[in-house]
Image: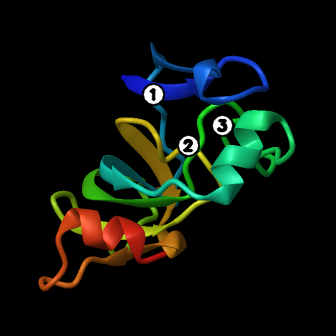
Amino acid sequence: MKALCITRPGGPEVLEVRDVPKPELSRDELLVRVRAAGLNRACTLQRRGHYPAPPGYAQDIPGLEFAGVVEAVGVDVRHHRVGQRVFGLTGGGAQAEYLPVAETLALPVPDALSDFEAGAVP
């Protein structure tokens, strides 16, 4: 999959689109095909080397807010289904084609919102 990666601390020039492995799911996660992701101050601080992602999240792929479509669900997921539009907030990694998200961190996108609007809500 493609992801926007931080290659080293610095300005926008350190960002590079790279091929990275598609994430694998744990039992309680959704695999979201990202359609929109936010860019905020935390992302710019992470790029500069001043805001590490929490443990367990991609350290080199920024992005906290996301919206997309559920592509797969872990065996313990109970409240989401494949094909459902979701949005939410994560610890990092949303600037990629696919994002693994804990079921509890994703909400259904209201029909009145586009993916781009939903990606900006969190």
Figure coloring: rainbow
Answer whether labels 2 and 1 touch (C-beta < 8 Å): yes
Q: Secondary structure at mark 3?
A: loop
Image coordinates of residue 36 in percent, x first then y, are 32, 53
Say which mark, if any, is on residue 107.
Answer: none
Cα gap from disc 1 to disc 3, whole angstroms: 11 Å
Q: Give the left or right position of residue 41, taking residue 69 as reference.
A: right
Nearer to the camera, 73 or 4: 4
Can residue 112 be seen here? The reply is yes
| Residue at 66% across, 37% down | 58
Residue wearing tag 2: 93
Image coordinates of residue 30 in percent, x first then y, are 40, 56
Residue wearing tag 1: 3
Q: Quadrant of residue 62?
A: top right
Residue 9 versus residue 52 in the image, above or below: above
Answer whether labels 2 and 3 touch (C-beta < 8 Å): yes
Cα gap from disc 2 to disc 3, whole angstroms: 5 Å
Residue furthest right in the image:
50
Residue 71 versus residue 102 in the image, above or below: above
Residue wearing tag 3: 58
Q: Quadrant of the N terminus?
A: top left
Which circle's residue, 1 or 3, is located before the other in the chain? 1
| Residue at 67% across, 17% down | 7
| Residue at 50% across, 56% down | 101
**Which amino acid, mark 3?**
Ala
Image coordinates of residue 117 in percent, x first then y, are 28, 72
**Which amino acid, mark 2?**
Gly
Q: Secondary structure at mark 2?
A: loop
Residue 72 versus residue 41 in the image, above or below: above
